Image (tube, helix red, strand yellow):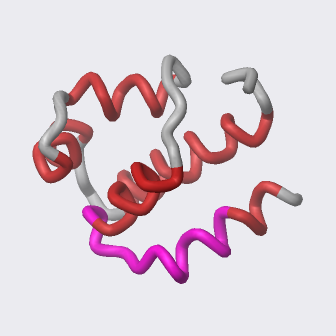
């Protein structure tokens, strides 16, 4: 899939907004995930895509409930 697909742009923006709303820095999220800061930077900038398992982990580490956030994300992709 093309990384510039508008749906990926929305997903990246959605996750970045969630992180910022929680007051979490990229480094803090990366530490929680046990990954380098560049992991967060790369998916937020579009250098890499994330899969569903990674999406769930990110949402959970932001102390949010995936069953609430994912439907919200899906709805934003159809707007």
Residue at image position (27%, 57%) is 23
Is residue 62 covered in magenta? yes
Give the image quarter of residue 38.
top left
Residue 59 position, x and y percent, is 39, 63
Which residue is at a point 87% across and 59% down the rendered structure image? 78
* Left or right, 45 with reference to 61: right
In depth, the one of 64 and 33 nearer the eye is 33
Q: Which residues are magenta?
A: 61-73
How many dots with numbers? 0
State the image quarter where residue 58 is shown: bottom left
**Depicted 45 relative to depicted 71: above or below:** above
Which image quadrant: the C terminus? bottom right
Q: Position of residue 52 (x, y in %)?
A: 52, 53
Which quadrant of the figure has residue 43?
top left
Q: Residue furthest top?
A: 47
Q: Work out whether 7 lies above or below 74.
A: above
Query: Who's the residue at 32% across and 68% down the image?
Result: 60
In the picture, measured across the screen, residue 52 lies left or right of residue 71, that is left
Q: Main secondary structure of the magenta part?
A: helix
12, above or below 14, in the image: above
- On-image quarter of the N terminus: top right
In the displayed structure, does residue 48 sit left or right of residue 6?
A: left
> Where is residue 22 shown, x and y percent of the image?
31, 63
Q: Is 35 drawn above or below residue 78 in the view shown?
A: above
Q: Is residue 1 magenta?
A: no
Outermost residue, right direction?
79
The residue depicted at 49 percent of the width and 39 percent of the height is 50
Relative side of 12 to 37, left or right: right
Residue 25, percent from left and from top: 23, 44
């Amino acid at each position: 899939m093309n990384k510039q697909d508008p749906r990926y742009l929305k997903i990246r923006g959605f996750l970045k907004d969630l992180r910022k709303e929680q007051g979490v820095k990229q480094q803090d999220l990366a530490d929680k995930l046990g990954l380098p800061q560049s992991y967060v930077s790369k998916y937020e900038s579009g250098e890499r895509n994330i899969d569903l398992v990674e999406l769930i982990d990110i949402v959970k580490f932001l102390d949010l409930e995936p069953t609430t956030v994912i439907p919200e994300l899906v709805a934003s992709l159809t707007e």
